[in-house]
Amino acid sequence: MIAASLGDNRRRASKTPFSSRLLASGAVRLRIVAFATVAELLGERETIVDRPEGTRLGELLDSLEHSVSGFDAVRDRLAVAVNGRLADADVVLTEDSEIALLPPVSGGRPAAPGRLTRQPIEVEALLAEVANPGCGAQLLFLGRVRSEHGAPAVTHLTYDAYDSMASEALDRICRDLADDEAGTRVAIVHRLGNVPLGEPSVAIVTASPHRAAAYEAGRAALERLKKEVPIWKREHFADGSASWREEEQLST
């Protein structure tokens, strides 16, 4: 099916429409194929869109997130293929590229043990992800947003990251620590964007046959995260001011 726009979704969503109008010049025509819940969000299985030359996959997904109601809630769970091959956000889309949006039930990628999210952290799901019958000890660390003592009080935090490098670093930390001790499993999820008071900004779960190894893996994961992962924190205060916290030199 060839469609000129995501018209059905525009009538349902309150967001700015994701335009597929033909650009006068310097445009490439793309075919988006969606499945299951994602097709329901878009309002159709296939659609044709025109985007500027040089558009990257991540930019196309950003456009969908801003225009399609509910897409932001599923984006982190998707695998995305370009012309039949799984692709990352930096891939440049060319004329007649086919972009397939694949939710987990239709072949979505397994979650990396270390990853970023822009949604509230699902703690129970993370615990289940690391649980193993051979692990007698399982530990959870949650780093929550707190109000600093004194004035002005902190109202919320904003986290930013160099996404590709941060994701790779988190994944590396988890795999390194799992390799250090037989039977140990580690997962880290760090939230980006605005995080309200009291909500977790980072969750670390470790599991191991013995509690000492689980404790050590959790401690090491947190210390390495603070030194090796390019994530930045901005504090927002009750008086309307804000400031970045830049305290630790990035290392490897």
Image (cartoon, grey):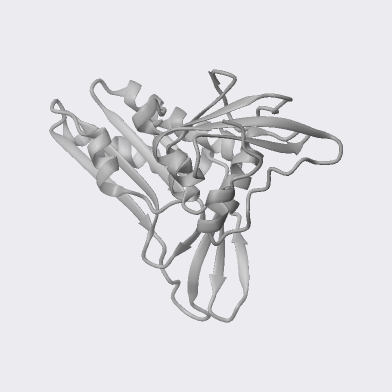
Residue 147 coordinates in the image, percent (x, y): 43, 71
Relative to the observer, which residue lies in front, 167 or 32?
Answer: 32
Which residue appears at 38% of the width and 28% of the height? 106
Relative to the observer, which residue lies in front, 16 or 179?
Answer: 16
Quadrant in which the N terminus is drawn: top right
On the question of residue 49 being in view, the answer is: yes
Residue 68 coordinates in the image, percent (x, y): 54, 50
Q: Is residue 21 left or right of residue 37?
A: right
Which residue appears at 41% of the width and 27% of the height? 109
On the question of residue 249 being in view, the answer is: no
In the displayed structure, 9 sits above or below 2; it is: below
Which residue appears at 37% of the width and 55% of the height? 143
Residue 14 coordinates in the image, percent (x, y): 55, 62
Residue at the extreme right of the image, as rendered: 25
Quadrant in which the C terminus is drawn: top right
Image quadrant assignment for residue 5: top right
In the displayed structure, 213 sits above or below 86; it is: below
Relative to the observer, which residue lies in front, 99 or 222?
Answer: 99
Residue 92 coordinates in the image, percent (x, y): 70, 28
Q: Say how many tags the image has.
A: 0
